[in-house]
């Protein structure tokens, strides 16, 4: 038996398909919602999910909230914009979770822009642990880009699909995804500091890593755009961190108790 763990915020366009996907292998669905203002929670309840309300605490912390509400030891974690492929459904059904020596299983993730599967820039295979025994593994209690820590995970030879962005423009301005601003706040709170060269150096490094070393040049316009967005995001992260150091007015106006 497997429970599903889905975190949401204004996901009415995605939640029904996500729950339907999870239902193929789970008969217990827990949705942890951070105050959606649309029909996300109503749809989830209509589809038989248990909805838990929790103000957003950050990625890893939020995903661990469900562990107090799930029925089973094994938990499948999906984002609202992720779906299991038929191959992944079959791979999960073939697992003997009651007898396995593994405490978690990692999935390959197909990251999409529109209907295009991006295989360069480190976007594939992009292994991530998504099925885990909650008594032996859990998400790291961090606010951004959390991953599951497991002692003995195994990679499954199957994919999930991540509908990351509906178009190229969202790489630069996806609603609700101010990653550079969030990261700058987190770095400042941790005592990290930047100098005048940091934005350029980190931005250039991110672009080169994506475009050259992770073969973005083989992905045409999509590869170039992903690399540029990675470089810009890194540049802005350090530029904003430097701004906090140099401009007392900006620093005073920022609410560091509300990173999200």
Image (cartoon, rainbow, N blue to C red):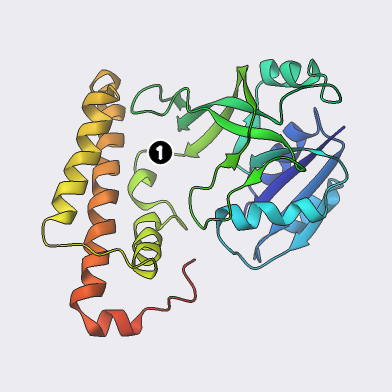
Local packing at callout 1 (Cα closer than 10 Å; few below 14, some 14-19, many 20+) is few
- Quadrant assignment, res 19: top right
Give residue 218's position: percent from left, percent from top: 26, 18
Position of 39 relative to 30 (above/below): below
The quarter of the picture where the N terminus appears is top right
Give residue 202's position: percent from left, percent from top: 21, 47
Q: Nearer the viewer, residue 26 or 205?
A: 205
Position of 215 relative to 36 (above/below): above
**Residue at image location 64% in from the left, 57% down from the top:** 62
Q: State the residue position of label 1.
A: 167
- Quadrant assignment, res 96: top right
Position of 214 relative to 207 (above/below): above
Locate residue 188 relative to residue 15 in the image: left or right: left
**Residue at image location 18% in from the left, 55% down from the top:** 199
**Residue at image location 31% in from the left, 35% down from the top:** 226
**Residue at image location 35% in from the left, 23% down from the top:** 120
Give residue 162's position: percent from left, percent from top: 54, 33
**Secondary structure of the residue carrying numbered label 1:** loop
């Amino acid at each position: 038996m497997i429970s599903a763990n889905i975190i949401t915020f204004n996901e009415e366009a995605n939640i029904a398909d996500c729950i339907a996907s999870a239902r193929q292998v789970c008969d217990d669905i827990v949705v942890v919602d951070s105050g959606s203002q649309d029909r996300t929670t109503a749809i989830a309840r209509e589809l038989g999910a248990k909805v838990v309300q929790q103000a957003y605490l950050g990625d890893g912390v939020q995903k661990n909230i469900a562990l107090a509400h799930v029925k089973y030891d094994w938990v499948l974690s999906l984002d609202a914009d992720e779906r299991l492929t038929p191959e992944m459904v079959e791979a999960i059904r073939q697992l003997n979770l009651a007898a396995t020596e593994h405490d978690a299983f990692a999935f390959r993730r197909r990251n999409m822009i529109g209907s295009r599967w991006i295989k360069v820039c480190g976007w594939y295979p992009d292994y991530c642990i998504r099925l885990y025994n909650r008594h032996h593994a859990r998400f790291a209690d961090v606010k951004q880009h959390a991953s599951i820590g497991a002692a003995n995970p195994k990679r499954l030879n199957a994919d999930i699909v991540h509908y990351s962005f509906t178009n190229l423009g969202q790489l630069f301005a996806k609603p609700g995804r101010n990653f550079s601003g969030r990261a700058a706040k987190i770095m400042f709170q941790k005592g990290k500091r930047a100098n005048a060269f940091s934005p350029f150096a980190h931005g250039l490094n991110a672009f080169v890593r994506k475009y050259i070393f992770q073969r973005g040049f083989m992905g045409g316009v999509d590869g170039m755009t992903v690399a540029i967005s990675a470089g810009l995001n890194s540049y802005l992260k350090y530029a904003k961190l430097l701004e906090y150091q140099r401009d007392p007015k900006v620093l005073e106006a920022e609410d560091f108790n509300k990173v999200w």
